[in-house]
Amino acid sequence: MSINATLFLQIVVFAILVWFTMKFVWPPIAAALDERAKKVADGLAAAEKARTELSFANKRVEEELAKSRNDSAARLADADRRAQAMVEEAKARAADEGGKIIAAAKVEADQQAVKAREALREQVAALAVKGAEQILRREVDARVHADLLDRLKTEL
């Protein structure tokens, strides 16, 4: 065989190989490469979307944290105000109770002073009767002289 025939035969075999490769081998490889490229592109898009969603989620989390901090600070301030109001109310009630106790003690002291004056008047009247008995050397009847003794009590 001559070199021309061998070369021609090799060219024909090579062309058949190229045609076979392009017809049967290359499409699955190209499809696999395209599918892989699509998966990579989808993965990159999903990563970008996830990154965007993560940034939005982080912003929402920060907003919620700030909101909850403000809310908790407001609740603490409200609780402090309520506690102060309760303390002031308790102080006012204690002052009212103290005033009532003092007023009751004054009333009781006044009543006891009146009772003591009445008892003292009775004693003075009794002493006056005894003194009058001693002066007159006879017994003075308290029932008979009740008007006189009442006037004496009121004068004292």
Image: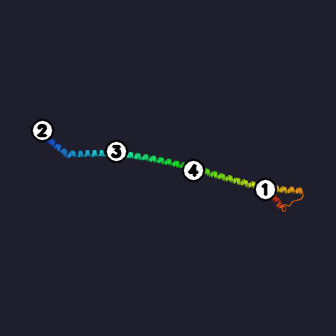
The alpha-carbon separation of the residues under discs 2 and 1 comes to 157 Å
- Quadrant showing the C terminus: bottom right
Camera-nearest label, 3 or 4: 4
Sequence-wise first label, 2 or 3: 2
The residue at which mark 4 appears reads as: 85
How crowded pointer 2 is (Cα within 10 Å; few <14, some 14-19, many 20+) is rated as few
Residue 52 location, x and y as percent? 36, 45
Q: Residue at x 82, y 55 (%)?
A: 124
Q: Amino acid at mark 1?
A: Ala
Left or right of residue 134, residue 100 in this image: left
- Provide the residue designation for mark 1: 119
Q: Decide which of 1, 17 is in the foreground and name it.
A: 17
Provide the residue designation for mark 3.
Answer: 48
Task: Look at discs 2 and 1 and give the one toward the viewer.
Answer: 1
Q: Earlier in the sequence, mark 3 or mark 4?
A: 3
Marks 4 and 1: CB-CB under 8 Å?
Answer: no
Q: Please tell me whether mark 2 or mark 3 is closer to you in this view.
A: 3
Q: Which quarter of the figure is the N terminus placed in?
A: top left
